[in-house]
Amino acid sequence: MTDHDDLDGILAVHAGREGALLPILHDVQAAFGHVSEPAIRRIAQALNLTRAEVHGVVSFYHDFRDEPEARPVLKLCRAESCQARGVEALAAALPENPRVKVETVYCLGLCSVGPAAMIGHEVHGRLDAARLGALVESLA
Amino acid sequence: MTVVRISDDAAALACGADAVAAAFVQAGCTVERVSSWGMHWLEPLADIDGTGFGPLSPDDVAEVLAGTSDKAIGAIAEHPFIARQQRFTFARAGKTRPLSLEDYAATGGWAGLKRARELGPEATIAEVTQSGLRGRGGAGFPAGIKWTTVAKAAGPVKYIVCNADEGDSATFADRMVMEGDPFMLIEGMAIAGHAVGAGKGYVYVRSEYPHAIAKLNAAIALAVPHIAPFEVEVRVGAGAYVCGEETSLLNSLEGKRGEVRAKPPLPALEGLFGKPTVVNNVLTLAAVPWILSNGGQAYADVGFGRSRGTMPIQLAGNIKHGGLFEVGFGVTLGELVNEIGGGTASGRPVRAVQVGGPLGAYHPPADFHLPFDYEAFAAADGLIGHAGLTVFDETADMSAQARFAMSFCAAESCGKCTPCRIGSTRGVELIDRIRARSGRAADRVETLPQMHNARKAPRTLGDEIELLEDLCETMKFGSLCALGGFTPYPVLSALKHWPEDFGVDVPDQEAAE
């Protein structure tokens, strides 16, 4: 977190909002790629919360990171419906690519067209080994 | 100029609908992006004057337009998958543009809200009560009773909260409503607000649904003049499955950790920010406009036993014809899987069907006679939950599925209550030992002389199975919410119906099952 002006701007947008912490954290995560310790201090101060309370919230939710992820992320669904459609075999056979982060997600709501993955907001269904491999390669 | 209608639902997008739409535009057609019919195995599906073509790739476009495509499926509305359904909530699916107020109004939109305003709050709740509508999120609590409680609660500030944290695998009906018919959900919330005296509604949508979030935000902006003075706001979850539990969701909306609250107090009396709150699932609220415009009795006339109306059932996993099938309660599991779903996509025999998401039981084909009904599934040690079906073929390893259920609970537990937080982790370890058939010798602590009550003898496989059943019992009755309380359903059902996968010797008679 280097730019405090941006953070203050985010806090100003949400000032006075009911239950503002999650929307603020989403915006901070989107703007800076993670929620840093200095950001937690500043948010806690603005919302009249303790740092521990804000840290507790940040660490509770899978979406918020405390460190930036430099690599592009592919979210691969490995919930039951995608398991039934063979995602475990795909995941096991996927060659390791150090330049791409393949994350597990539990359910993208594409359970009838799995195995499914999401890159940013872009969704992909009916994956097989070749298509999944190509997606990972396209990010590298 | 030929008008081609193609869905912009996320399931269609995931199958390449944008590229197909672009190819039609390239060929000189006008493309309208509509909601999905719910026949997901045919996505991307093109609808030209009511005739369907699918699943298409951009290469098929020329043949479709030339009339020589072998992807033609005939009239979509007469397709057996569609013709067999009773679509109340999904009446507009495939037919309207999701963000077109014109399309919405032309297909009966806002009629429910108009009638609710004419009837007044009390009579509106009476219609919902008469319809027999039960919470579609899984618990099946009568919506009319919940609304009455909130309406009678004292206080000037009340809230409507729509639970759109659809985290269960095999469920996507909420997503389809939000992406395909967002005005219907907004109208349902406005009716609820009018009925109980709430001025503000929140839709809590999971962050894994960016398309639904975008559509809802756009729809809310357009709907303001229709629902005013009622206000609706979207709030985005942050990847915690447990926030689908209503009290955890309320904490999350308040900006706290999504930890479960003990009940009582009921959210209906002390909910969001301590105020009386209606918390209903997307499908519950989305059913309300139909009930108000057609009357509660018309809805109650459909159904089975105490389960009234229709259920949007989601067919998923290893199934040939996956998608959304809305029908009155009472259809059997076997009809859904074999006749409507066409059996497995892999062509192998069905081994198990998980009904109700990660917390639902695994059912063997021997249960295929079960009618889709809250009580019938409860009597068979299962639940219908949010009505998602995941079909597995014979290659499924059921002890691995049981292990997954425990590990999922461990990963997603909010940590508030011990049976769920610790029981799930011990459950994973226990199932790992059962799968390894290793048994377990007494460990260092157990052999200490001061551990008088600890068992000193090694545990056999049989002991471990007994321990697993005991652990499940503790989780089932000792957990605060459905996450820890229902995780035993998949585990115990797998153990009961497929003991051979856990290394238990079964008599020949049962093995033949």
Image (cartoon, helix red, strand yellow):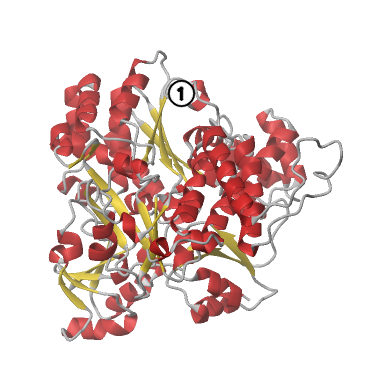
Q: Amino acid at mark 1?
A: Leu
Chain letter belonging to callout 1? B
Q: Is residue B249 left or right of B155 when viewed as pictured?
A: right
Q: Residue at x 31, y 30 (%)?
A: B142
* Residue B167 picture location, percent across and down: 47, 50
Q: Is residue B342 left or right of B239 when viewed as pictured?
A: left
Q: What is the crowding at mark 1: few (fewer than 14 residues within 10 Å), some, or many (at least 20)?
A: some
Q: Residue at x 30, y 79 (%)?
A: B26
* Residue A124 picture location, percent across and down: 46, 69
User: For the residue labelled by badge 1, is the local secondary structure a helix, a strand or a loop?
Assistant: loop
In depth, the one of B188 and B307 nearer the eye is B307
In depth, the one of B331 and B446 nearer the eye is B446
Give the residue pinned by disc 1: B266
Seen in the picture, residue B263 relative to B253 is either above or below; the reply is above
- Is residue A79 visible in the rendered image? The answer is no
The quarter in which the N terminus of chain B is drawn is bottom left
Q: Is residue A103 left or right of B367 when viewed as pictured?
A: right
- Is residue B300 visible in the rendered image? The answer is yes
* Residue B96 picture location, percent across and down: 22, 56
In depth, the one of A48 and B84 nearer the eye is B84
Seen in the picture, residue B433 relative to B284 is either above or below; the reply is below
* Residue B282 picture location, percent across and down: 36, 42
Q: Residue at x 45, y 66 (%)?
A: A84
Quarter of the view holding residue A9 = top right
Quarter of the view holding residue B95 = bottom left
Q: Is residue B4 left or right of B393 when viewed as pictured?
A: left
